[in-house]
């Protein structure tokens, strides 16, 4: 009935190889961004930790493959509730100041992490995956989202985790989950007209939200605008008309203040040129001038070391993942699986676009990691789990040509996988013969 | 539908990917060179500025009068200074409302030293304050000298001054930039003890390991030539640059040239006047994190400035003046100016009393409090006195030029202008009770020789105030002497318009008064010397102290040569004719040189040296105190400083004591003693060789010296003898060595 969890299927293997390349580049970069004299972390130690994260996450991913997405889907709401509950201690910690024995102490004023021995768990990262599963599960067969009022419930469900995450605050994760929600509604068949109305309402609320943002958050947005030399000069000459954007002082101190990270990130990536300085070489590798260079801004160091070639390789890997994910979604006929696959693709692609957009100065800083590359246990874990779900979908394409069956049939009475095209609309061939390839 | 939407999704992602690839190409291919340069620059460490050496001031013979000597400053970080003097305020209720104060900054700066030791902030603060106390005590112990005593209080006062100045700079910069932000001065150490010698340097290095906020910074000490007292006023002083100067510095945008808060800047004398030349430009060395030198701009030392002074002459004349002033009991000081007639270069600019510029800081309190001899006054430039009889040659020239008198016009002097009023408009010969014979019938030459007042009264009445004042103006009275020093006063030329500005009509009496150099007319000693040079040459020219630049402009005066000749004959007669007012006291016994000149006894008002202030003390009791001060305003300032609670009426404050102390007999008046003249070359017949223009003009002033002839005449003669002794009979002051006088 079931495939071995180690049988990844063809798109699965493509994804596996792409992730392998990304993880290797990430660990190689983390290993050389050694900053023993500054922020107190050591490159090699971090590389080893990251390797451990990756191996652990791979193990969890195997477990997910072993269980299968269908089994998991039955507990979609339970997983969602557990993930939401994981956020609650942080809420309590922020509200009351209780630290739960040091477990929930804030870092830079944000209550995002639960401090466990050895690493810091970021519940909002795991929330991403739980949210994905729950949303896919909710949307799988419903027709009511074809009506505008039916769209409200998914949004309302989203409000709970999003507001909790926003409260931490972790604006980046919220910004990530909103496109996921939209795309999944879009893919589930919601009317474009309805989505556009909601999007327009959102856009109309932007000026209101802009007022509500904290000064440092606004500064992150304006820092991107202030990249323009002419704008800065204009503000310095006469700050009055640009009151909403930045003060004269912010314009003068941009490169040392709000724009510092951006300036150095662009310097690092731009100075790499086409071929880069080479692994472990270069000014931004040798000197810790760029904050979070092993983490959110790791692409800047990759571009610094390996130049445009390195960056394009990274992009190519993500392209491979996205295309494979789209193929998987396209091939499978289980509505839940389709939505899940699309959700995973959107989750990863959006992270990549936002992260790289930040690094190259097209978007404000949001604190988004580069999936599989950036240092960080929770991020690696959530992305591995998400991809495991995707591969799991590819492993268990329901062999259904008929109309949409009852739900229990889709889950319980899976016919064995068989060669041959199972979906007329797909050009992708069926599962490959067993090759005996294994992870071990 | 699903697949169509999948395609749309894929297209959206691809578009985003294309944008990113485009941006990457833009960054990494098109602008790669720019970012590579910027990346290199990001490694730069903060540039370090290197001090420059301020230029020296040298005299015309090349003797260095003041120069920078190497020295070191003991500096303390601003953060520590600000925290140390900060009062411990009440704790703010809300943590968010509390502004980060100086003590927090200090504890943050030396986090490991304090926060590492204890988590308790109060305890950390106490530890820091204790260590600052020890710092002050150690500095007092190591660097306190008799000349410059130190104590914790003195050092804290210095710290307060520094912090106050930095805060003023910050406010000024805030006004200029439009927002409040830290200034450079808040991040650097500031000098607490300046001018350490090598021994002091060793002592200072003892302190360094114990206190992280102490630094030793290479600097320099402005050192004056040995026995610099005669030069103190003219060279001037350096002082800390004021906050206003920093804020309004035209070079504020040039980091290497702009003034820093700690810097010393010329604030008086030549140091002020030649600041631009003397001041150099700091150097800058920039290294990057790899230790490589990226930029090395060497410091540009200041240029030397040559002054026209002759140092040896200045010293000798200072000695002579001092002796004379000390011999006159009522005199409070004096001045001597020696000019080169041709170029109007100042050969000597002596003001007595003076002070040792090398010990200025130590002496400052006593110098400031000396309200009798006012040693800080630059008398030769800044003090104005009525010129007295020294302007009589101008009266004669105007009279001759306007045709009101001729060379052979004779006027009868009976001792009085008005026969029926013997108390006013007298001739000087008939003074008080002592009756000497009047001048009788005299011409221009005789009137000048005998310094006849009655003759001048009459000529003055004839020509009028207008003509007199325009002649004064031509000779530089009431005008900028253009010496370039900030101290120089302009004197007063009481023209009719000037009188009108004082709401005074023009009376004939004004003309009479001005004709003998009394009344509202005032000149400074430098103007007097220039006037004498003008008499000697017939040309008016600006004086010149600092060499370099354009030669000063020159004006030929519109008087006829025969009139000049008569006037010069009269001036010659003053000293060399038996009827002359200075014949007995100033005549030079020399085969080659004759001293010519005009004496002057300018009416002087005694000056107040202290004020009596009646006041009600805090308890309402009536009290009286006497405050030594030269000016009423200063007396009030000092009094309110010492008695903040007292109430008083400024109207009740009266002068308590005057200078001079000596009371003169009834009818006599105090006068400043002038002698202005020049050294005239004699022909073989020992008569003046009028074809040779005099080379040197002099002006001598003794405050409250009494009669110009009696007090300043002998001094002028001594000056002339020194000049001849120093420069030889040819008065060649630019000869490399002193010419030997053949027997």
Image: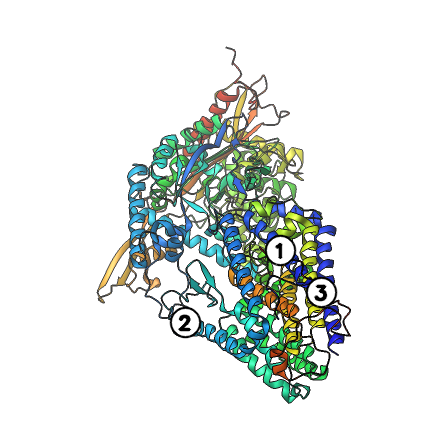
For this rendering, which residue is in front, B277 or A416? A416
Image: A253 above or below B340: below
Res B709 visible: no
Which residue was labeled with disc 1? Answer: A20
Residue A323's disc is 3
Residue lying at the far top in this picture: please name it: B743
Asked if residue B36 lies left or right of residue A369, the reply is right
Mark 1 to mark 2 CA distance (whole Å): 38 Å
Q: Do the residues at pointers 1 and 2 share their chain?
A: yes
Q: CA distance from mark 3 to mark 2?
A: 41 Å
- The alpha-carbon separation of the residues under discs 3 and 1 comes to 16 Å
Pick whichever, A200 or B217, lies toward us.
A200
Residue B608 x %, y %: 35, 50
Q: Chain of mark 1?
A: A
Does residue A147 sit above or below B147 in this rendering?
below
Which element type, helix, strand or loop, lies under badge 3? Answer: helix
Read off the chain for label 2.
Answer: A
Chain of residue at mark 3: A
- Disc assigned to residue A93: 2
């Amino acid at each position: 009935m079931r495939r071995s969890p180690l049988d990844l299927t063809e798109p699965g293997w493509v994804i596996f190889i792409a992730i392998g390349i990304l993880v290797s580049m990430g660990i190689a970069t983390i290993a050389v961004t050694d900053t023993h004299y500054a922020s107190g972390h050591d490159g090699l130690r971090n590389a080893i930790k990251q390797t451990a994260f990756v191996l652990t996450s791979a193990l969890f991913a195997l477990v997910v493959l072993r269980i299968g997405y269908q089994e998991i889907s039955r507990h979609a709401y339970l997983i969602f509730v557990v993930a939401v509950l994981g956020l609650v201690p942080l809420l309590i910690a922020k509200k009351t100041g209780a630290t739960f024995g040091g477990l929930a102490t804030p870092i830079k004023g944000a209550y995002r992490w639960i401090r466990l021995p050895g690493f810091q768990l970021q519940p909002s990262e795991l929330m991403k995956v739980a949210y994905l599963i729950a949303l896919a599960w909710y949307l799988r067969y419903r027709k009511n989202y074809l009506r505008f009022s039916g769209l409200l419930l998914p949004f309302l469900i989203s409000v709970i985790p999003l507001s909790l995450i926003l409260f931490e605050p972790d604006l980046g994760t919220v910004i990530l989950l909103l496109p996921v929600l939209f795309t999944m509604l879009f893919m589930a068949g919601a009317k474009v007209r309805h989505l556009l109305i909601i999007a327009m309402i959102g856009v109309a609320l932007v000026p209101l939200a802009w007022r509500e943002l904290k000064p440092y958050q606004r500064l992150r947005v304006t820092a991107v605008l202030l990249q323009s030399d002419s704008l800065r000069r204009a503000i310095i000459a006469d700050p009055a008309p640009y009151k909403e954007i930045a003060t004269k002082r912010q314009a003068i101190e941009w490169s040392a203040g709000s724009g510092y990270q951006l300036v150095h990130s662009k310097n690092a990536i731009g100075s790499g040129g086409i071929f880069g300085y080479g692994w472990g070489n270069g000014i931004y590798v040798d000197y810790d001038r760029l904050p979070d260079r092993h983490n959110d801004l790791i692409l800047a160091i990759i571009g610094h070391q390996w130049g445009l070639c390195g960056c394009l390789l990274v992009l190519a890997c993500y392209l491979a993942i996205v295309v494979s994910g789209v193929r998987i979604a396209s091939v499978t006929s289980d509505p839940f699986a389709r939505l899940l696959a699309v959700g995973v693709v959107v989750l990863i692609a959006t992270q990549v676009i936002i992260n790289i957009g930040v690094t190259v100065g097209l978007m404000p800083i949001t604190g988004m990691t580069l999936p599989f590359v950036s240092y960080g246990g929770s991020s690696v874990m959530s992305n591995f789990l998400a991809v495991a779900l995707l591969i799991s979908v590819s492993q268990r394409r329901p062999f259904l040509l008929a109309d949409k069956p009852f739900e229990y049939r889709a889950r319980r009475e899976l016919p064995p996988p068989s060669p041959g095209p199972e979906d007329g609309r797909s050009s992708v061939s069926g599962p490959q013969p067993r090759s005996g390839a294994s992870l071990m | 539908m699903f697949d169509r939407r999948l395609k749309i999704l894929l297209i959206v992602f691809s578009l985003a990917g294309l944008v990113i690839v485009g941006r990457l190409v833009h960054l990494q291919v098109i602008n790669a060179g720019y970012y590579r340069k910027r990346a290199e620059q990001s490694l730069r460490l903060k540039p370090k500025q290197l001090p420059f050496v301020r230029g020296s001031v040298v005299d015309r013979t090349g003797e260095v009068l003041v120069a920078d000597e190497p020295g070191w400053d003991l500096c303390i970080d601003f953060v520590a200074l600000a925290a140390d003097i900060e009062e411990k305020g009440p704790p703010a209720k809300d943590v968010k409302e509390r502004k980060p104060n100086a003590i927090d900054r200090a504890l943050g700066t030396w986090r490991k030293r304090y926060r590492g030791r204890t988590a308790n902030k109060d305890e950390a603060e106490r530890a820091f304050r204790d260590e600052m106390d020890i710092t002050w005590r150690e500095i007092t112990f190591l660097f306190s000298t008799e000349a410059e005593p130190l104590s914790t209080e003195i050092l804290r006062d210095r710290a307060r001054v520094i912090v106050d100045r930095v805060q003023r700079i910050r406010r000024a910069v805030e006004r200029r930039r439009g927002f409040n932000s830290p200034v450079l001065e808040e991040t650097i150490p500031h000098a607490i003890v300046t001018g350490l010698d090598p021994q002091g340097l060793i002592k200072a290095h003892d302190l360094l390991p114990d206190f992280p906020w102490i630094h030793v910074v290479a600097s320099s000490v402005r050192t004056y030539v040995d026995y610099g007292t005669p030069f103190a006023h003219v060279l001037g002083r350096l002082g800390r640059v004021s906050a206003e100067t920093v804020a309004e510095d035209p070079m504020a945008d040039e980091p290497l040239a702009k003034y820093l808060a700690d810097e010393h800047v010329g604030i008086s004398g030549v140091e002020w006047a030649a600041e631009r030349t003397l001041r150099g430009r700091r150097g800058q060395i920039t290294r990057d994190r790899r230790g490589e030198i990226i930029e090395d701009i060497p410091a540009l030392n200041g240029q030397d400035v040559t002054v026209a002074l002759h140092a040896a002459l200045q010293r000798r004349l200072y000695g002579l003046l001092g002796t004379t002033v000390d011999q006159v009991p009522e005199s409070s000081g004096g001045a001597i100016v020696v000019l080169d007639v041709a170029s109007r270069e100042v050969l000597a600019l002596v003001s007595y009393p003076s002070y040792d510029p090398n010990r200025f800081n130590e002496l400052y309190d006593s110098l400031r409090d000396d309200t009798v001899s006012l040693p800080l006054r630059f008398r030769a430039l800044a003090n104005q006195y009525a010129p007295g009889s020294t302007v009589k040659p101008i009266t004669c020239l105007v009279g001759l030029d306007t045709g009101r008198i001729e060379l052979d016009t004779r006027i009868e002097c009976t001792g009085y202008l008005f026969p029926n009023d013997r108390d006013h408009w007298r001739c000087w010969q008939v003074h008080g009770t002592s009756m000497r014979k009047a001048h009788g019938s005299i011409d221009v030459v005789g009137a000048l020789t005998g310094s006849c007042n009655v003759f001048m009264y009459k000529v003055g009445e004839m020509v009028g105030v207008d003509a007199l004042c325009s002649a004064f103006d031509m000779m530089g009275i009431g005008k900028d002497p253009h010496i370039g020093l900030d101290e120089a006063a302009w004197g007063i030329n009481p023209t009719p318009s000037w009188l009108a500005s004082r709401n005074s009509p023009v009376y004939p009496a004004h003309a009479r008064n001005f004709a003998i150099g009394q009344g509202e007319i005032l000149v400074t000693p430098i103007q007097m010397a220039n006037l004498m040079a003008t008499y000697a040459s017939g040309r008016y020219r600006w004086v010149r102290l600092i060499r370099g630049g354009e030669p000063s402009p020159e004006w030929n005066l519109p008087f006829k040569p025969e009139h000049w000749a008569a006037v010069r004959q009269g001036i010659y007669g003053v000293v060399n004719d038996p009827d002359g007012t200075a014949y007995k006291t100033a005549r030079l016994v020399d085969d080659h040189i004759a001293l010519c000149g005009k004496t002057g006894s300018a009416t002087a008002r005694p000056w107040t040296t202290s004020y009596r202030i009646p006041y009600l003390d805090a308890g309402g009791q009536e009290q009286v105190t006497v405050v030594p001060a030269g000016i009423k305003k200063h007396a009030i300032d000092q009094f309110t400083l010492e008695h903040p609670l007292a109430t008083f009426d400024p109207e009740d404050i009266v002068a308590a004591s005057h200078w001079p102390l000596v009371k003169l007999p009834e009818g006599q008046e105090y006068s400043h003693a002038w002698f202005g003249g020049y050294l005239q070359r004699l022909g073989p017949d020992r008569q003046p060789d009028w074809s040779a223009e005099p080379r040197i003009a002099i002006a001598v002033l003794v405050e409250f010296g009494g009669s110009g002839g009696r007090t300043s005449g002998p001094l002028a003669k001594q000056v002339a003898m020194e000049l001849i002794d120093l420069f030889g009979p040819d008065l060649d002051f630019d000869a490399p060595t002193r010419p030997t006088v053949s027997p």
